[in-house]
Each structure stands twice: as C-alpha cells, then as structure tokens.
Image (spheres, helix red, strand yellow):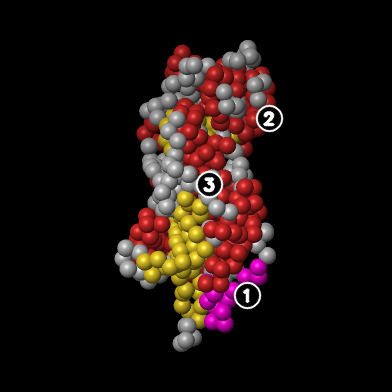
C-alpha cells in the first residue's frame, strides 16, 4: 500500500505523488528541441522526485536515454577540478549501471583519457557518439559543486554544446537550489570567483518548480482515498493547503502525521489537520530544522526581522541579494510583496526565535485554565504586564532580532501559557506596522458541546521619531475584529523610544474606544 513520503525522493510504486509532467510542464518541449535549461527550487520541493520520474519516462519510451545523477559527492573537493571531474564521471558510470541500461547504452568503460579541465567534454562526447539514442543528462544538486570546479563543469558543458553540437549531449538540465545566475554567489560568496562572463549562457530558460496548487493538494489526497477509502473533508483539504501553501514536503507531512502518527482511521477533518500542524511544529522535523538553522545568518535576519516587526524593507543591492537568498531557501514566497512562505514557517520562525524567552516564563499554564477549559485571559494579561516589568528590557536586549524583540517576548509568553490546549494564529508582514494575534482555546459550553474562546490582540511598537500609535492601532484593531466578528480585543503598545520612561512606570492598562465604538483594553508596556 502506498503512503505519504517525507524522506527522500518519491517512488510511484510506494508513494502518493503527482506525475512529473504536471510539475515540469515545459521540460518535454525543451528536451525535444535539444535545449539546455536550469531547474531550481528550495529543498524538499520535489525536484529530485520529478527529475527521476521524468528520466524514467523518457528512457522507457525508447526515444531518449535519460539519466539523473547527483553531484553531491563532489562537494568536499572544492576547487580541485581534477578530483571533481573524476568524481562526476565515476558517479555517472555507477548510476548508469544501477539503472540497468542495455550494454550498448552504457557509457565507455573506461572513460577516454583527456587533459585536466577537459575530461567531462571528452567523456560525454565519447558516450554520445557510441549511444544509439539522444543522450539527456540531469545534473541534480549542481550547486553542491563550488568555485573553480563549478566554473569548469559549466564551461565544459557550454563548450560541448557550442563546438560539437551533433556529437554532444542532446539536452542537459542543471538542477539545484539557486538559479544559474546566482551560481557565482553559490561558489562561495565572491561573484568574481566565476569571472565576469556567464559560464552557462546557453540555457534556454530557468524554471522554478512550483509548490502544489489547491487542486493538486486535493488530487494527491484523493489518491489516498481511492486506495484506502479514507476521505478528507473539503475543509480539511482547504486547511491543509492554507497551512502549507502547497509546499510539497509539508503537504505530505501533514497527511502522514494524521494517518501514521495520530493513527486516525475515520474521515479526516479540519480538527485533525489543526492538530497535525501543531505536532509538526513542536516536533520540528529535519526539514523544518534545516530551515530555522539559517535564522542566525545576517542575510536571513535582514529579511525576516522587518517582516516580524512590520517595518519597511531596505532597497539597496545587498538587500536584494539577501531576498534572493532567503527565497531560494524557501523561507519566503516566490512573489511580491515579500512574505513568509506559509503559516507553518511563520509559526516555526517565531517559536524558534522566542524559545529562549519562553524558558524564562515559569508560570504553570494549567493555572490559567478555568473549569470549563477557557483561558482566564484578564489574568494572563496582568501576569504578562508583571513579567514585562521584571524581565522585559533584559530579554529584549538579548534578542538578536532587535527590531522585533518586544513582540517576540510577548508571543513567547503567550505560547508558554496557551500551548498544550489552544492555538495562536499570527499575522505579520512587511509594512504592516503591527502583528495581529488570535488566541483560540477550545472549551466545553453549558450544553456539553465543544466551543471556542477567541481573543484578539494587536501588537504595535512606538519607535523614535514616530507619533503615538494609539489612534492608528485602534483603527487597525477594528479591522481585525471585524474579520472575526468579535466585539472586543486588546491593543498592546510597546514604547521602544530611546527617551521612554522606565518600564515599571509605563506598563499600565486602560480602556479605549475604537472608531467603530468598541471598548477595548490597551496595554502600554
């Protein structure tokens, strides 16, 4: 029985997966024309799966001989062109043998002798000449090769394409995290290391493999329903798509969590998806850890910090390169305006950045639960105000993301108290000037049925050279409350001006009336 795969490439015999042709719609046209192109996408997006499936299809159809192989084995050898050439040719030979090609389709054994810096061109020419089919090669993880070695490989492919077109590889696909235009940076951060001219200016196009659409998520989940009879409700599919925004690993991971870890055997509902999302975030599987490990890098902080703080982005070339880098990591979406790629990444980022702060919250979450399961929200706010008076300045000063430090302190406090029963939905983004939070706590109503307590908060920061954000914040809070049909909420204003009074004198509660006439709580901290 097939299952939802979260480790390594997918196999159509073992795993639910979408056809390669659907994920790479232009690939066959480029290959039929004998063109060279680049395929790039963040990790765990299905690149290797799609390439392997496409290579298998092309070869089995009988018109081409297609081979996908990984360049990762060459990574440790850096600028040693001699060793990298030998490693790549060895990988190609072993991969071709493993695929079980007929003897007449296999590459030469041994490869022909050639001079340093020319071995790849000579070897692939020899294989092309002896192979009765047009040769198609997929260089997977091409950006694992660095520096002079990367330049040599790209230029040898270009030389073969331009000098001996009829006796060289019919079509080449370079696949990696980054577009070929960024390989200079990938070579070690110094654009000059690959020279001023492009080492691969023969590519017809750079293709970014996209995330799943809503329809594709539904199609993937429907494969499970057809094989097992277990259904996903429409709301469950909608919520899975919302939380993941179609990121392939997350789409599979949420379904696998529900079916394999939670062992749900009934119809899968949106409540199951909600729980699975929380479990994934808490567990922080390898894929999520590999992303958040980048949060301490300057290029990542430069992009993520203003998103959390709601401030404007820089506009210089250094920042543009940082945006490109963070987008290639998959942390931000491949569109405008700049935004975190999906709600799961949003939550993971905030929890990771606030984890050290959360360790300083010594209150017992269960003490904030009332007998029916609701949160004692007024007490929660009072306790936060006391916590901020004692610890706010110190914790904010220790936070590496200084512009968002105050908001991170409060969100870490909320998470410590709400975690284990409720949910915190967070909205933040560039230029918003605020963070919107919705605390959702399930409880048992007077009729014994499950109900939801919902508490809305808006966090704003008063910085130097800015006016008091109270009036703007009240108007923004109205809009947020309208969306959820709530009658009241909380506006928190952190005074981070250099001339602000000490925290113990400015942390005060008051009531205010919004433009829509709602009475809301205001906490100045």
Residue drawn 43% across and 33% down? 315
Q: Position of residue 472 (x, y in %)?
A: 37, 55
| Residue picked out by circle 3 | 499
Span colored in magenta: 363-377
Which mark is on residue 367?
1
Position above or below: 303 against 239:
above
Which numbered mark, 2 or 3, is in the foreground of this view?
3
Q: Quadrant of residue 214?
A: bottom left
Q: Position of residue 207 (x, y in %)?
A: 42, 35
Residue 382 visible somewhere in the drawing = yes
The secondary structure that dominates the magenta segment is loop
Q: Residues under labels 1 and 2: Cα distance?
A: 53 Å
Q: Position of residue 16 (x, y in %)?
A: 50, 55
Which numbered mark, 3 or 1, is in the foreground of this view?
3
Residue drawn 52% across and 39% down? 302
**Which numbered disc flags the more N-terminal residue, 2 or 3?**
2
């Amino acid at each position: 029985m097939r299952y939802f795969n979260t480790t390594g490439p997918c196999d159509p015999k073992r795993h639910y997966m979408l056809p390669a042709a659907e994920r790479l719609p232009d690939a066959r046209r480029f290959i039929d024309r004998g063109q060279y192109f680049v395929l790039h996408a963040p990790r765990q997006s299905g690149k290797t799966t799609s390439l392997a499936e496409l290579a298998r299809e092309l070869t089995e159809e009988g018109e081409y001989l297609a081979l996908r192989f990984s360049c990762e084995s060459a990574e440790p050898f850096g600028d040693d062109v001699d060793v990298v050439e030998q490693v790549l040719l060895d990988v190609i030979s072993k991969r071709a043998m493993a695929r079980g090609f007929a003897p007449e389709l296999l590459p030469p054994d041994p490869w022909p002798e050639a001079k340093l810096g020319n071995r790849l061109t000579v070897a692939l020419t020899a294989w092309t000449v002896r192979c009765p089919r047009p040769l198609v090669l997929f260089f997977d993880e091409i950006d694992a090769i660095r520096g002079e070695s990367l330049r040599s490989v790209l230029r040898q492919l270009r030389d073969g394409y331009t000098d001996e077109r009829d006796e060289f590889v019919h079509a080449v696909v370079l696949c990696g995290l980054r577009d070929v235009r960024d390989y200079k940076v990938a070579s070690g951060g110094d654009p000059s290391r690959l020279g001023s001219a492009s080492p691969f200016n023969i590519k017809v196009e750079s293709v970014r493999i996209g995330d799943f659409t809503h329809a594709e998520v539904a199609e993937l989940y429907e494969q499970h329903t057809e094989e097992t009879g277990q259904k996903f409700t429409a709301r469950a599919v909608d919520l899975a798509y919302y939380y993941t925004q179609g990121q392939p690993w997350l789409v599979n991971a949420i379904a696998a969590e529900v079916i394999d870890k939670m062992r749900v055997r009934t119809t899968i509902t949106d409540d199951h998806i909600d729980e699975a999302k929380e479990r994934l975030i808490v567990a922080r599987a390898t894929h999520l850890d590999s992303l958040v490990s980048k949060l301490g890098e300057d290029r990542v902080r430069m992009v993520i910090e203003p998103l959390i703080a709601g401030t404007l982005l820089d506009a210089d070339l250094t920042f543009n390169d940082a945006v490109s880098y963070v987008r290639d990591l998959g942390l931000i979406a491949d569109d405008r305006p700049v935004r975190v790629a999906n709600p799961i990444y949003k939550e993971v980022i905030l929890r990771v950045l606030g984890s050290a702060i959360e360790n300083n919250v010594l209150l017992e979450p269960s003490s904030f639960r009332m007998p029916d399961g609701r949160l004692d929200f007024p007490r929660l706010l009072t306790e936060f105000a006391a916590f901020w008076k004692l610890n706010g300045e110190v914790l904010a000063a220790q936070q590496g993301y200084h512009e968002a430090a105050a908001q991170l302190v409060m969100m870490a406090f909320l998470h410590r108290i709400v975690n284990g029963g409720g949910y915190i939905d967070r909205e933040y983004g560039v230029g918003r000037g605020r963070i919107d939070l919705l605390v959702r706590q399930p409880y048992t109503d007077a009729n014994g049925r499950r109900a939801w307590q919902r508490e809305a908060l808006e966090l704003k920061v008063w910085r130097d050279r800015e006016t008091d954000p109270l009036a703007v914040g009240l108007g923004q809070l109205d809009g947020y409350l309208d969306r959820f049909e709530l009658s009241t909420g909380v506006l928190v204003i952190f005074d981070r001006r250099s001339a602000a009074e000490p925290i113990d004198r400015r942390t005060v509660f008051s009531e205010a009336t919004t433009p829509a006439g709602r009475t809301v709580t205001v906490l100045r901290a």
